[in-house]
Amino acid sequence: MKLKIFLLLNLILIISCNENLDPFGDFKEKYVLNCIVGADTTFQVALLSKSYSSNNYDPYSDSTNHSVDNSLIRLWNGNEIVSILKDTIIERSEYDNYKNPYKVYYTNNFQPLPNSFVEIEAILPDGKKLRSSSVVPDKIIFKKELCDTIIPAKDRDYIKIVWNGNQQDQVFVTRLGIYYFKYENGKKIRKIALVPQSYIFYNDEYIPDYPEPTNISAFSVNLEVINKTMELISKGDPEKGNYEILSCILEVLSLDENLSYYYNSTARGRDLYSVKLDETDYSNIQGGYGVFGIYNKSNYVLRFTHDYIRSFGYKPGLKL
Protein backbone atom coordinates (compact mmCIF):
# COMPACT_ATOMS: atom_id res chain seq x y z
CA MET A 1 0.00 0.00 0.00
CA LYS A 2 2.82 2.40 0.91
CA LEU A 3 4.54 1.59 -2.38
CA LYS A 4 1.41 2.50 -4.36
CA ILE A 5 1.11 5.85 -2.57
CA PHE A 6 4.82 6.56 -3.17
CA LEU A 7 4.49 5.79 -6.90
CA LEU A 8 1.36 7.96 -7.14
CA LEU A 9 3.12 10.94 -5.53
CA ASN A 10 6.08 10.59 -7.89
CA LEU A 11 3.75 10.48 -10.87
CA ILE A 12 2.04 13.71 -9.73
CA LEU A 13 5.43 15.43 -9.27
CA ILE A 14 6.63 14.34 -12.73
CA ILE A 15 3.44 15.63 -14.40
CA SER A 16 3.59 18.90 -12.45
CA CYS A 17 7.22 19.54 -13.37
CA ASN A 18 6.52 19.02 -17.06
CA GLU A 19 3.73 21.61 -17.13
CA ASN A 20 4.43 25.33 -17.56
CA LEU A 21 3.05 26.92 -14.42
CA ASP A 22 2.16 30.62 -14.74
CA PRO A 23 1.03 32.12 -11.40
CA PHE A 24 -0.28 35.26 -13.15
CA GLY A 25 -2.40 33.65 -15.85
CA ASP A 26 -2.92 35.41 -19.19
CA PHE A 27 -1.43 38.91 -19.10
CA LYS A 28 -3.78 41.74 -20.04
CA GLU A 29 -2.27 45.16 -20.58
CA LYS A 30 -3.89 47.96 -18.56
CA TYR A 31 -3.28 51.69 -18.46
CA VAL A 32 -2.39 53.40 -15.18
CA LEU A 33 -3.15 57.04 -14.32
CA ASN A 34 -1.86 58.62 -11.09
CA CYS A 35 -2.48 62.23 -10.09
CA ILE A 36 -2.56 63.94 -6.67
CA VAL A 37 -3.89 67.51 -6.87
CA GLY A 38 -2.72 70.00 -4.24
CA ALA A 39 -5.16 72.75 -3.29
CA ASP A 40 -2.23 74.81 -1.93
CA THR A 41 -0.44 75.20 -5.27
CA THR A 42 -1.02 75.90 -8.99
CA PHE A 43 1.48 73.20 -10.05
CA GLN A 44 -0.13 69.79 -10.68
CA VAL A 45 1.45 66.63 -12.11
CA ALA A 46 0.01 63.42 -13.60
CA LEU A 47 1.77 60.19 -14.54
CA LEU A 48 0.45 57.92 -17.29
CA SER A 49 1.88 54.45 -17.88
CA LYS A 50 0.85 50.89 -18.69
CA SER A 51 1.11 47.61 -16.83
CA TYR A 52 3.73 45.05 -17.77
CA SER A 53 4.78 41.49 -17.03
CA SER A 54 8.38 40.49 -16.43
CA ASN A 55 9.73 37.18 -17.71
CA ASN A 56 11.15 35.99 -14.39
CA TYR A 57 8.32 37.26 -12.11
CA ASP A 58 10.63 39.89 -10.60
CA PRO A 59 9.17 43.37 -11.36
CA TYR A 60 12.48 45.06 -10.49
CA SER A 61 14.30 43.15 -13.23
CA ASP A 62 12.46 45.16 -15.89
CA SER A 63 14.20 48.36 -17.04
CA THR A 64 11.87 49.39 -19.87
CA ASN A 65 10.14 52.75 -19.80
CA HIS A 66 6.40 52.05 -19.66
CA SER A 67 5.16 55.65 -19.71
CA VAL A 68 2.56 56.54 -22.37
CA ASP A 69 3.26 59.32 -24.89
CA ASN A 70 0.97 61.44 -27.05
CA SER A 71 -2.01 61.46 -24.69
CA LEU A 72 -4.44 64.26 -23.86
CA ILE A 73 -4.97 64.85 -20.12
CA ARG A 74 -7.55 67.43 -19.02
CA LEU A 75 -8.73 68.76 -15.67
CA TRP A 76 -12.25 70.01 -15.02
CA ASN A 77 -13.37 72.24 -12.15
CA GLY A 78 -17.15 71.94 -12.16
CA ASN A 79 -18.35 71.89 -15.78
CA GLU A 80 -15.43 73.92 -17.11
CA ILE A 81 -12.15 72.61 -18.54
CA VAL A 82 -9.60 74.57 -16.53
CA SER A 83 -6.37 73.05 -17.76
CA ILE A 84 -4.87 70.82 -20.45
CA LEU A 85 -1.71 69.25 -19.13
CA LYS A 86 1.54 69.56 -21.07
CA ASP A 87 4.07 66.74 -21.31
CA THR A 88 7.73 66.97 -20.40
CA ILE A 89 10.76 64.84 -19.56
CA ILE A 90 12.41 64.56 -16.14
CA GLU A 91 15.76 62.84 -15.77
CA ARG A 92 16.01 59.97 -13.30
CA SER A 93 18.60 59.45 -10.61
CA GLU A 94 21.70 57.56 -11.70
CA TYR A 95 20.82 54.92 -9.09
CA ASP A 96 17.30 54.34 -10.49
CA ASN A 97 16.57 50.87 -11.87
CA TYR A 98 14.91 52.49 -14.92
CA LYS A 99 17.41 54.28 -17.14
CA ASN A 100 14.98 56.15 -19.39
CA PRO A 101 13.77 59.57 -18.17
CA TYR A 102 10.35 60.14 -16.61
CA LYS A 103 7.55 61.18 -18.94
CA VAL A 104 5.17 63.41 -16.96
CA TYR A 105 2.19 65.62 -17.71
CA TYR A 106 1.86 68.91 -15.82
CA THR A 107 0.12 72.26 -15.49
CA ASN A 108 1.17 75.37 -13.63
CA ASN A 109 -2.13 77.27 -13.75
CA PHE A 110 -4.69 75.27 -11.77
CA GLN A 111 -5.43 75.70 -8.06
CA PRO A 112 -8.85 74.35 -7.06
CA LEU A 113 -11.04 76.01 -4.44
CA PRO A 114 -12.15 74.17 -1.28
CA ASN A 115 -15.32 72.07 -1.67
CA SER A 116 -15.24 72.33 -5.48
CA PHE A 117 -15.68 69.32 -7.80
CA VAL A 118 -12.59 68.29 -9.81
CA GLU A 119 -12.46 65.72 -12.61
CA ILE A 120 -9.54 64.31 -14.59
CA GLU A 121 -9.69 62.63 -18.01
CA ALA A 122 -6.90 61.04 -20.02
CA ILE A 123 -7.50 60.24 -23.71
CA LEU A 124 -4.94 57.70 -24.91
CA PRO A 125 -3.47 57.43 -28.43
CA ASP A 126 -5.76 54.46 -29.19
CA GLY A 127 -8.87 56.44 -28.14
CA LYS A 128 -9.35 54.79 -24.73
CA LYS A 129 -10.35 57.07 -21.85
CA LEU A 130 -9.41 57.03 -18.18
CA ARG A 131 -11.49 59.11 -15.76
CA SER A 132 -11.84 59.94 -12.09
CA SER A 133 -13.22 62.72 -9.90
CA SER A 134 -13.26 64.05 -6.36
CA VAL A 135 -14.24 66.98 -4.15
CA VAL A 136 -11.57 69.28 -2.74
CA PRO A 137 -11.39 68.95 1.07
CA ASP A 138 -11.94 72.11 3.08
CA LYS A 139 -9.16 73.62 5.16
CA ILE A 140 -9.28 72.33 8.70
CA ILE A 141 -10.32 74.59 11.59
CA PHE A 142 -7.95 74.61 14.56
CA LYS A 143 -9.60 74.56 17.99
CA LYS A 144 -7.57 77.39 19.43
CA GLU A 145 -8.93 76.94 22.94
CA LEU A 146 -7.40 73.43 22.95
CA CYS A 147 -4.15 74.30 21.17
CA ASP A 148 -0.83 75.36 22.63
CA THR A 149 0.65 78.58 21.27
CA ILE A 150 4.01 78.79 23.08
CA ILE A 151 6.96 76.39 23.39
CA PRO A 152 7.54 75.24 26.05
CA ALA A 153 3.92 74.87 27.14
CA LYS A 154 2.96 75.89 30.66
CA ASP A 155 2.68 73.18 33.33
CA ARG A 156 3.29 70.18 31.03
CA ASP A 157 6.09 68.53 29.08
CA TYR A 158 4.41 68.27 25.66
CA ILE A 159 2.58 70.41 23.12
CA LYS A 160 -0.78 69.61 21.53
CA ILE A 161 -2.76 70.98 18.57
CA VAL A 162 -6.38 69.98 17.88
CA TRP A 163 -8.57 70.61 14.83
CA ASN A 164 -11.88 69.75 13.14
CA GLY A 165 -12.18 67.61 10.01
CA ASN A 166 -15.18 67.81 7.67
CA GLN A 167 -15.53 64.23 6.45
CA GLN A 168 -15.94 60.78 7.96
CA ASP A 169 -12.82 58.62 8.41
CA GLN A 170 -10.68 61.43 7.04
CA VAL A 171 -6.91 60.96 7.04
CA PHE A 172 -4.42 63.67 7.99
CA VAL A 173 -0.69 63.93 7.25
CA THR A 174 1.28 66.10 9.70
CA ARG A 175 4.71 67.71 9.59
CA LEU A 176 6.21 69.83 12.37
CA GLY A 177 9.18 72.01 11.49
CA ILE A 178 11.45 74.47 13.30
CA TYR A 179 12.19 77.42 11.01
CA TYR A 180 15.49 79.24 11.48
CA PHE A 181 18.28 81.23 9.85
CA LYS A 182 21.90 80.16 9.76
CA TYR A 183 24.62 82.72 9.07
CA GLU A 184 26.99 81.38 6.40
CA ASN A 185 29.70 83.54 4.80
CA GLY A 186 27.93 86.71 5.87
CA LYS A 187 24.55 85.62 4.52
CA LYS A 188 21.39 84.43 6.30
CA ILE A 189 20.26 81.07 4.92
CA ARG A 190 16.70 80.01 5.77
CA LYS A 191 16.39 76.39 6.89
CA ILE A 192 13.89 73.94 8.39
CA ALA A 193 14.56 71.25 10.99
CA LEU A 194 11.82 68.63 10.97
CA VAL A 195 10.62 67.43 14.37
CA PRO A 196 9.92 63.67 14.50
CA GLN A 197 7.45 61.89 16.74
CA SER A 198 10.37 60.36 18.60
CA TYR A 199 14.06 59.51 18.30
CA ILE A 200 15.61 56.04 18.33
CA PHE A 201 19.20 55.92 19.57
CA TYR A 202 21.08 53.43 17.40
CA ASN A 203 24.80 53.07 16.63
CA ASP A 204 25.58 56.30 18.52
CA GLU A 205 23.08 58.24 16.39
CA TYR A 206 19.61 59.62 16.97
CA ILE A 207 17.37 58.21 14.23
CA PRO A 208 14.14 60.23 13.70
CA ASP A 209 10.81 58.39 13.66
CA TYR A 210 8.31 60.64 11.87
CA PRO A 211 4.53 60.50 12.40
CA GLU A 212 2.44 58.35 10.06
CA PRO A 213 -0.87 59.43 8.48
CA THR A 214 -3.67 59.29 11.01
CA ASN A 215 -7.44 59.45 11.40
CA ILE A 216 -7.03 61.38 14.67
CA SER A 217 -7.67 65.14 14.35
CA ALA A 218 -4.95 66.06 16.83
CA PHE A 219 -1.16 66.22 17.03
CA SER A 220 1.10 66.07 20.07
CA VAL A 221 4.82 65.68 20.69
CA ASN A 222 6.91 65.55 23.85
CA LEU A 223 9.09 68.52 24.72
CA GLU A 224 12.16 66.27 24.99
CA VAL A 225 11.82 65.51 21.24
CA ILE A 226 11.71 69.24 20.43
CA ASN A 227 14.71 69.75 22.73
CA LYS A 228 16.70 67.10 20.88
CA THR A 229 15.79 68.60 17.50
CA MET A 230 16.96 72.01 18.71
CA GLU A 231 20.28 70.50 19.84
CA LEU A 232 20.80 68.68 16.54
CA ILE A 233 20.31 71.91 14.54
CA SER A 234 23.89 72.93 15.39
CA LYS A 235 25.40 69.48 15.88
CA GLY A 236 29.21 69.72 15.65
CA ASP A 237 29.18 73.51 15.32
CA PRO A 238 30.54 75.42 18.34
CA GLU A 239 29.31 78.76 16.94
CA LYS A 240 25.77 78.63 18.34
CA GLY A 241 25.34 82.37 17.83
CA ASN A 242 25.16 81.80 14.06
CA TYR A 243 21.68 80.34 14.47
CA GLU A 244 18.58 82.54 14.63
CA ILE A 245 15.42 80.66 15.61
CA LEU A 246 12.13 81.92 14.18
CA SER A 247 9.10 79.74 14.95
CA CYS A 248 7.66 76.23 14.89
CA ILE A 249 5.00 75.48 12.26
CA LEU A 250 2.71 72.46 12.06
CA GLU A 251 1.56 71.57 8.54
CA VAL A 252 -1.59 69.46 8.31
CA LEU A 253 -2.58 67.91 4.98
CA SER A 254 -6.27 67.00 4.94
CA LEU A 255 -6.89 64.22 2.40
CA ASP A 256 -10.02 63.88 0.31
CA GLU A 257 -12.27 60.81 0.39
CA ASN A 258 -10.27 59.07 -2.36
CA LEU A 259 -6.89 59.42 -0.63
CA SER A 260 -8.37 58.72 2.81
CA TYR A 261 -9.98 55.53 1.50
CA TYR A 262 -6.73 54.59 -0.23
CA TYR A 263 -4.77 54.90 3.01
CA ASN A 264 -7.42 53.21 5.15
CA SER A 265 -7.64 50.24 2.76
CA THR A 266 -3.93 49.75 2.08
CA ALA A 267 -2.27 50.64 5.40
CA ARG A 268 -0.55 47.79 7.16
CA GLY A 269 -1.44 46.73 10.70
CA ARG A 270 -2.58 49.65 12.88
CA ASP A 271 -1.25 48.12 16.11
CA LEU A 272 1.12 45.45 17.42
CA TYR A 273 -1.57 42.78 17.15
CA SER A 274 -2.65 43.38 13.53
CA VAL A 275 -1.26 41.22 10.74
CA LYS A 276 -1.95 41.79 7.01
CA LEU A 277 -1.24 38.77 4.84
CA ASP A 278 -2.43 39.98 1.43
CA GLU A 279 -1.66 43.04 -0.66
CA THR A 280 -4.67 45.29 -1.17
CA ASP A 281 -5.12 46.50 -4.74
CA TYR A 282 -6.79 49.92 -4.73
CA SER A 283 -7.82 51.98 -7.74
CA ASN A 284 -10.39 54.71 -8.35
CA ILE A 285 -9.68 55.19 -12.08
CA GLN A 286 -12.50 54.32 -14.48
CA GLY A 287 -11.20 52.43 -17.52
CA GLY A 288 -7.86 51.52 -15.95
CA TYR A 289 -5.86 51.55 -12.74
CA GLY A 290 -4.32 54.19 -10.51
CA VAL A 291 -5.19 56.78 -7.90
CA PHE A 292 -6.65 60.27 -8.28
CA GLY A 293 -7.03 62.39 -5.16
CA ILE A 294 -6.82 65.89 -3.69
CA TYR A 295 -5.37 67.32 -0.51
CA ASN A 296 -5.55 70.69 1.20
CA LYS A 297 -2.92 72.15 3.51
CA SER A 298 -3.35 74.18 6.71
CA ASN A 299 -0.66 75.70 8.93
CA TYR A 300 -0.53 76.37 12.66
CA VAL A 301 2.23 78.58 14.11
CA LEU A 302 3.78 78.19 17.56
CA ARG A 303 6.25 80.65 19.08
CA PHE A 304 9.30 79.86 21.21
CA THR A 305 9.98 81.84 24.37
CA HIS A 306 13.22 83.80 24.12
CA ASP A 307 14.56 82.14 27.26
CA TYR A 308 14.01 78.73 25.69
CA ILE A 309 15.89 79.74 22.50
CA ARG A 310 18.79 81.26 24.47
CA SER A 311 19.13 78.09 26.57
CA PHE A 312 20.60 76.42 23.47
CA GLY A 313 22.92 79.35 22.73
CA TYR A 314 20.83 80.52 19.76
CA LYS A 315 19.42 83.98 18.93
CA PRO A 316 15.68 84.73 19.02
CA GLY A 317 14.50 85.84 15.58
CA LEU A 318 10.97 87.04 16.36
CA LYS A 319 9.31 89.19 18.95
CA LEU A 320 6.80 87.55 21.28
Image (cartoon, helix red, strand yellow):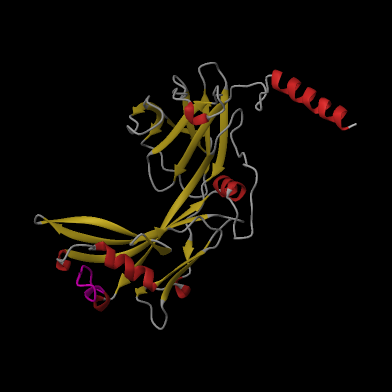
From what the image shows, is residue 67 above or below residue 184? above
Question: Residue 274: percent from the left, percent from the top?
Answer: 64, 56
Name, please, the residue furthest toward the top: 126
Question: Who is closer to the viewer here, 186 or 15?
Answer: 15
Can residue 106 be seen here?
Answer: yes
Question: Residue 75: percent from the left, percent from the top?
Answer: 48, 33
When asked about the image quadrant of residue 38, the answer is: top left
Question: Residue 119: percent from the left, percent from the top?
Answer: 53, 36
Quarter placement of the N terminus: top right
Left/right of residue 151 with respect to residue 313 in the rendered view? right
Question: Residue 257: percent from the left, percent from the top?
Answer: 58, 48
Quarter placement of the C terminus: bottom left
Q: Is residue 95 magenta?
A: no
From what the image shows, is residue 151 above or below residue 23? below
Left/right of residue 156 with respect to residue 134 in the rendered view? left
Can residue 19 be seen here?
Answer: no
Question: Who is closer to the viewer here, 175 or 278?
Answer: 278
Left/right of residue 241 with respect to residue 320 in the rendered view? left
How many labels, in total?
0
What secondary structure is the stretch in magenta mostly built from? loop
When asked about the image quadrant of residue 83, the answer is: top left
At x 21%, y 75%, the residue is 310
Tell me where the magenta segment starts and ends, as one range. Answer: 309-320
